[in-house]
Image (spheres, rainbow, N blue to C red):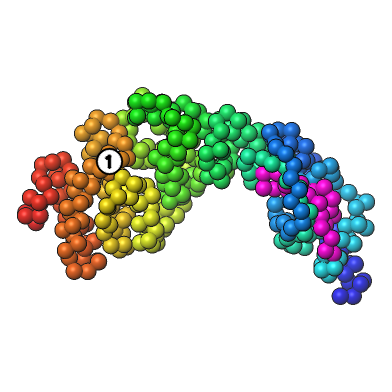
Amino acid sequence: MDNSIAAERASAAFDRAVRRGRSDTGLAARLRRQDNRLLLLSQVASRVQTGSETYLGPREIPVARIIGSEDRGDDFSRSFYPRRRWMRTRWQTVYRLLQAQELNEAIRVMEIGGYYFVRDGHHRVSAARSLGVEFLPAVVTRLSLDYQLPCSLDRNRLALLCAKERFHRRTGVFHVLPDSRFSVACPETWELLEREITDYNLSYFRRHFGRDPYSLDEQIEYWYENLYRNSISYIQRNSLSYLFPGMYDTDIFVRMIQLWNSYENPDGIWLGEVYTKFISRYRRRNLLRSGLQMVRSRWGHTFMSSEDEYRMFLQISRVPEFIPDFEPLPQEAGCYMFLYRQLISTAALLLKRELDRAPYMQELVLAWHERFYREAAAAARRQTSARAKVSWYKRFSRRWFCRVFHGSVTVQQALDGS
């Protein structure tokens, strides 16, 4: 490329970048009480309990995960746009060299919680962002941290980092579960999650088993397997994020749990009922978003593959854990969505009335399997094709499931009467 043309393009790129940098950190941002200057390493390190430094050496790092600086926070916006006119000459030179792929010198960075802070090479990062460069060579030193920094962390979201740090120090959950299992946008969610685990769930565990957990690992894993994982799956399958703009899945989860614990006798309410009450309440609050959520949810259910249905059913019911010799029906379209509703909706409510409390998942699955599924599925498997097996099971269930589950008739009597 002609040098004069390259120089003009670099100059124009700098003008655009510096305008953006000044705009991002200007009067409008200050009126909104936003500090959009580049995040400093010290602002993070002073708020968390870090470990030792480890030299990792040279490697390629993603530019998108470079979020801050060791000491030049005032010179760039949070997106690495330059803020100072005097940076023009150096910035344009770096821009031209990067564009011509003639600059291979590594930057120096500190990595903490999966993200990078620049020690040397700020102009290269800034120019790389303007050019859309995805990776840069870097010499990396790691400052150890037990968890990942929150995504999109900047000076305005440090409260979220502080809340996550407090949660970890008080609960130690990230020693049991990776923090990637939690997606949080609201600082208060971490406090609510702490209360759910250390108060509500611990009390539930004691009521269920009649003892304290032997270890934190036992309690957290039980909570994760029996409540959290299934609830997050429900939130995602039903596209509930449409009803909660600006919130992530864990934010929605703790609000669902708040509703559950607001009832006088939470143990008397089955989790499936909580889902129904929760979604009904928030749909009424925003009719437009409710329509979008329902369309997206139905679209997802309609086009779910038979394999995905099967995996969802096994994950939520934990049938292989409770019934090692479980014999599945064929993975035909709609089959395991039908079984899911039969178990989670119909059987759960029938067993709740019988026990006068919400059933535990294990006793629900065992009752469903022994009272109805085992014999009914065996009869269905006598049909010729996979589709015929599933169709027969559905027809038989619609006619006989409630009566068989109640004990009014046996499966054999129902088969004789069909």
Q: Quadrant of residue 384?
A: bottom left
Circle 1 sits on which residue? 364
Relative to 78, residue 45 above or below = above
| Callout 1 secondary element | helix
Q: Quadrant of residue 352?
A: top left
Q: Which amino acid does label 1 sit on?
A: Leu
**x and y percent of residue 193 in the render?**
51, 33
**x and y percent of residue 320 in the render?**
33, 50
Q: What stretch is highlighted in magenta?
A: 103-124
- Residue 409 can be seen, yes or no: yes
Residue at the spot 34% in from the left edge and 30% down from the top edge: 208
* Quarter occupied by the C terminus: bottom left
Instruction: Give the crowd class for mark 1: few <14, some 14-19, many >=20 residues within 10 Å.
Output: many
Q: Nearer the viewer, residue 338 or 327?
A: 327
- Residue 248 can be seen, yes or no: no
Residue at the spot 90% in from the left edge and 53% down from the top edge: 87
Residue at the spot 73% in from the left edge and 59% down from the top edge: 60
Q: Which of 147 and 7 is in front in this view?
A: 147
